[in-house]
Amino acid sequence: MISLSPDLISRFHAALLDLEPRFVGIRLEDEHTDTELRAWLDGDSEPLPWSHIDRVTADEWFFVSTLYGEMTLEGQRTHIRKFFPSLFVEAAHRDIRNFIPNMAEFRGLRSAWMRRRFCRMGEILRERGLSMTDYADELRSREAKATPEDPMPALDFIIRDHRATGWKTLSVFVRDCVGGNCFPIDSRVEKELRRHDLPIDERELVHLSLALHRNPRVVARMFYNAGGESP
C-alpha cells in the first residue's frame, strides 16, 4: 500500500479546497457522464448517430475514449465526430468485436496506437466470447472487490489485458463507463497537479482521494476541467 505523508495529504486537501468552489453546480458526478459526453460531442452540431437517445453504450464509450489524446479539446471533438459515423457505425457496425487489422477505415486516425488499441480490444472480446458490455460488467465485478490495499482492480485488469505501457484512455474508459477508481492524467491534469505541487502519479492520486473520502473520478474530472482554464 502506498504510504502518504501528512504533508502530501495536506497539499492535496488544499488543492481541493481551492478547486471545489469553481465547480459548484457543475455536473461532475458519475451519473452525469453519459449526458455530459453527448452534450460535448453534439453541441450545436448535428447529433452523432448514437445507438440510444438516453444512454451511451460500452462500445461507444470505448470508441470515444480511445480517441481522446494528443489534441486540444476541440481537436478531440473534431476527431471523434469525423470517425464515429464512418469507422464505428459503418465499418464496425457499432461493435468493438468487429475491429480487425488493416481496415481501410482506420486511415487518417491521429495515431497508430489508436488502431492497435481497437484491434487488441476486439481480439480480447472475440477470444473470450464476450461483448463490450460483458467486458465492462466484468470490470465492474472486479472493481466491487476493491480494497484500500488494491483500490484499482478494474484499471489494473484492463491494463494487463492490453499489455499497455500507456493507458490514459483506458483510464478514461474505466472512469466514465465502468465507474472504477482511477485518475487519468493528460497535459491538462498534469498542468493543474504541478500548480499545486502534487505527484504526477495516478495510483498515488487515487490513494489521496480515498484517504480524504473523495470520489477519485469526480476529483479527476475537476482537475481536468481546471487544467483547461487560463492561468
Image (spheres, rainbow, N blue to C red):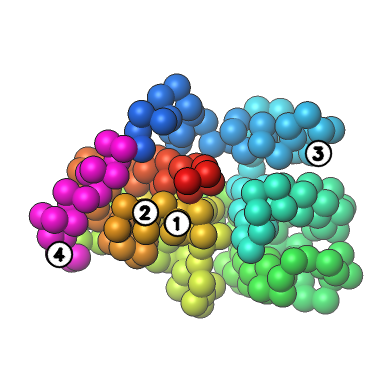
| Disc 2, SS | helix
Q: Is residue 119 left or right of residue 105?
A: left
Segment tinted magenta in the rendering: 1-18
Q: Is residue 64 left or right of residue 179?
A: right
- Mark 2 burial class by Cα count in 10 Å: few <14, some 14-19, many 20+: few
The residue lying at 25 percent from left, 55 percent from top is: 207
List the residue tagged with mark 1: 191
The three-letter amino acid code for the residue at tag 4 is Ser
The CA span between labels 2 and 4 is 22 Å
Label pair 2/1, CB-CB below 8 angstroms:
yes
Label pair 1/4, CB-CB below 8 angstroms:
no
| Precedes in sequence: disc 1 or disc 3 | 3
The three-letter amino acid code for the residue at tag 3 is Pro
Q: Position of residue 213 (x, y in %)?
A: 22, 40
**Is 23 or 28 nearer to us in this picture?**
23
- Mark 4 burial class by Cα count in 10 Å: few <14, some 14-19, many 20+: few
| Disc 3, SS | loop
Q: Is residue 75 magenta?
A: no
List the residue tagged with mark 3: 49
Q: Position of residue 142 (x, y in %)?
A: 37, 56
The residue lying at 34 percent from left, 65 percent from top is: 201
Q: Is residue 200 left or right of residue 168?
A: left
The three-letter amino acid code for the residue at tag 2 is Arg
List the residue tagged with mark 4: 3
| Precedes in sequence: disc 3 or disc 2 | 3
The residue lying at 71 percent from left, 39 percent from top is: 41
Which is in the foreground here, disc 2 or disc 4?
Answer: 2
The CA span between labels 3 and 4 is 47 Å
List the residue tagged with mark 2: 195
Which is in the foreground here, disc 1 or disc 4?
Answer: 1
| Disc 4, SS | loop
